[in-house]
Image (cartoon, rainbow, N blue to C red):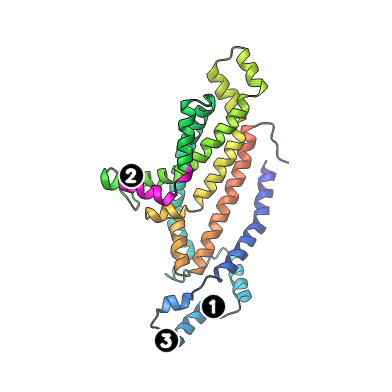
Amino acid sequence: MWAYIVKRLVLSVPVMFGVAFIVFSMIRLIPGDPAQIIAGQAATPEYVAAIRRDLGLDRPIIVQFGVYFSSLVRADLGRSIRSRAPVTEELAARIPNTVRLAAASIVIATLVGVGAGIVSAVRPYSLADAAVMVVALAGLSMPIFWSGLMMILVFSVLLGWLPAVGTGSLAHLVLPSVTLGMTSAAIIARMTRSSMLEVLRADYVRTARAKGVAERVVINRHAFRNALIPVITVIGLQTGTLLSGAVLTESVFAWPGVGRLLVESILSRDYPVVQASVLVVAMAFVLVNLAVDILYAAADPRIHYQ
């Protein structure tokens, strides 16, 4: 297993290089001049050119990428064009907030989604099954920005139970995490139901029931564990998506995370921060996928990695 983990980490290096190259190239295709944004609309062309020269934006793109890549190898992400602060400091201030939001959201999504999916699969085509599927469809259909605004309207404006925006306490985490977890819970519920229905029709489940094994034991020990592989896959993908910043949720709730930082940096053409934020997102996906593969082996002892 350790050899497999090391191999996957080594293979992630060219992936990160490819991501860095693609992001570096595409960010420079966005209209707008960061030097002009920094200088202001009333600045003289000479002043704008001086800023562009100071930032190295007057060099050929291939030279700029060479300088960027050499700094990246030294773990130097550069300085923000907008604030002139080190990019590592800006990310270090935002990553814990995004991790906290993503962790709370995936816990809510997993508990609600897996529980609803099991109930729906154990009683297929019943009223409970229909209710779960309708709620899941609604969760998938509602845009996050709309459901977030409705959460703020109901629980902050009308009822006054929870703060609408910002961070600082556990109460500030409730609305954004529930909003963000709703869509993931719907996806997990549908996958859990589908996987459980397939397993519950298997011969060994019918054999266990014929032997007189309690239904609770059949569901928990025989069916659920064998239905875990696709569910773990979906949870892993959703975790990677949530860790990527949850841009809309962080924007609606003014949550100071990586997603909001990414939006602000794109609008201000802050190249170093955009590039570093996307690299963090890509690394999060790589690590989550690795964790999912490890969980496969834990859930199913028949799976071995060479």
Dot label at residue 171: 2
Residue 178 drawn at (x, y percent): 41, 43
Name the amino acid, label 2: Ala
Instruction: Mark 1 or mark 2: name the one nearer the start of the chain.
Output: 1
The range drawn in magenta is 140-153
Nearest the camera: 130 or 144?
Answer: 130
Given contact means CB atoms under 8 Å apart, are the residues at marks 3 and 1 in contact? no
Name the amino acid, label 1: Gly
In this rendering, does residue 107 appear at all?
no
Give the residue at x 48% y 70%: 269
Per the image, the residue denoted by label 1 is 56
Q: Tell me, yes or no, whether the highlighted magenta stretch contains residue 45.
A: no
Instruction: Mark 3 or mark 2: name the one nearer the start of the chain.
Output: 3
Instruction: Mark 3 or mark 1: name the one nearer the start of the chain.
Output: 3
Per the image, the residue denoted by label 3 is 44
Judge the density around disc 1: few (<14), some (14-19), many (≥20) Cα neighbours within 10 Å. Answer: some
